Amino acid sequence: MPLPPLMRIVLAAVLTAALAACGGGSSSSSSSGDSGGTIKIGVDLPVSGADASIGVPTQNGVVLAVEEANKNGFAGGKFKLEASLLDDAVQGKHDPAAGAQNVKTFIADSAVLAMVGPFNSNVAKSEIPLSNDAGLAQISPSNTNDGLTIGDDAKKLRTAHPDVNTYFRVCTRDAKQGAALAQTAAQRLKFKKVFVIDDNETYGKGLADVFDASFRQLGGTVLGHEHITANQVDFKALLTKVKSLNPDAVFFGGNTSTGGGLIRRQMADVGMGSIAMLGGDGIGDDEFEKQAGDAANGSYMTIAAPDASKLPSAKDFIAAYKARFNGDVGPYSANAYTAAKIEIAAIEKAIKDNGGKMPTRADVLKNIAATTDFESPIGKVGFDAAGDTTSPVLSLDEVKGGKRVVIDVITLKS
């Protein structure tokens, strides 16, 4: 019989505390006897290479939250909060092995009580078994693959402690994103025939599979569905084949760094410049327009976050971000800021509950899991028993004049 949500939270906290006491995978949990010092939030994101254009502004959101907390007297000034920043990009692209190594670094540092990240779903897949084993809470601003929280795939990531959930996200899942994109293609844009391409990664293939099935269910025709290979840069043979089928649009499941921008540019090279391209949040970065050039126009993509610039609740955050970093917020800056704020609040409560002393990771995890209606720039945020947000929302963007423009905000059922 499934346990009620509250019982799951209590059980998770008890088991995680037991892990810490046993000194197994969670041997790095913080000392509970300290009465002051530095507390760290680990931040694992891709901040170099092709992923940097979206990774850096996401990281900035966490940095801003930490700096504000210290400025406002975090934990009564007894502790100093610090963001421990690590890059999971290798040779210009997010790398699951690098992400796993970064999490091991956080786990080995007893001052790290929670972490924000990762950005990419395949990186999360390599990290969750580690955070589950160590009892280290992590909140992703952007992971959307369903298998990270739902079904047998999620269970396989938590074999060390199946009843302990340490992974949370403030964005929606691909089952909702892919279905929304299919509805956009079939009902808003009136496309009848689409060719589907994906990068065969955890995120890209998962999103493309959902879009494929949903578009067919809506009466559309999928002319074909093919995977590209890692590090592939020449797609003209595939696109020439796609052109011969006369599609209304090409759907791409993947990231700019795994081929999205180059595919869009090469569509124009083979005479498909007037054919629309659709994709998810993986191509919702500045690097996409940079790589695709003028061919980027006429592309549509969803972002697994609200358009913060249009939200009254984000007004102060946006002003503070611009003042601190002298630039505009990225698509996931507000999500990352919110993830960090939730963790900071959880840590402060844990310190208070522990009589002003350094709390354990289990204390922090318990508070994060219990989050409901947390006021943030992206609205009220909470987590269900699986760790998914209870307030899923998407922004729909179109590239016009070389720039992404938000054309709709889609509120989804939780």
Image: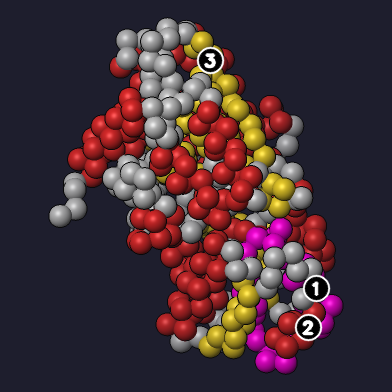
CA–CA distance between discs 3 and 2?
55 Å
Q: Residue at x 69, y 46 (%)?
A: 89
State which quadrant residue 172 falls in. bottom left
Q: Pointer 2: what residue? A: 237
For the residue carrying disc 1, how many other residues have a C-alpha within 10 Å: few (<14), some (14-19), or many (20+)?
A: few
What quarter of the picture does the N terminus occupy? bottom left
For the residue carrying disc 2, how many other residues have a C-alpha within 10 Å: few (<14), some (14-19), or many (20+)?
A: few
Q: Earlier in the sequence, mark 1 or mark 3?
A: 3
x and y percent of residue 61 in the render?
60, 35
User: Secondary structure under badge 3?
Assistant: strand
CA–CA distance between discs 1 and 3?
49 Å
Q: Are the residues tagged 2 and 1 within 8 Å (C-beta)?
A: yes
Q: Residue at x 63, y 75 (%)?
A: 227
Q: Pointer 3: what residue? A: 38
Q: With 253 as the anchor, is 235 left or right in this view?
A: right
CA–CA distance between discs 2 and 1?
8 Å
Which residue type does callout 1 highlight?
A: Asp
Q: Residue at x 28, y 35 (%)?
A: 15
Count of numbered badges drawn on the protein = 3
For the residue carrying disc 3, how many other residues have a C-alpha within 10 Å: few (<14), some (14-19), or many (20+)?
A: few
Magenta-drawn stretch contains 256:
yes
State which quadrant residue 249 falls in. bottom right
The part of the chain drawn in magenta is 243-271
Q: Pointer 1: what residue? A: 234
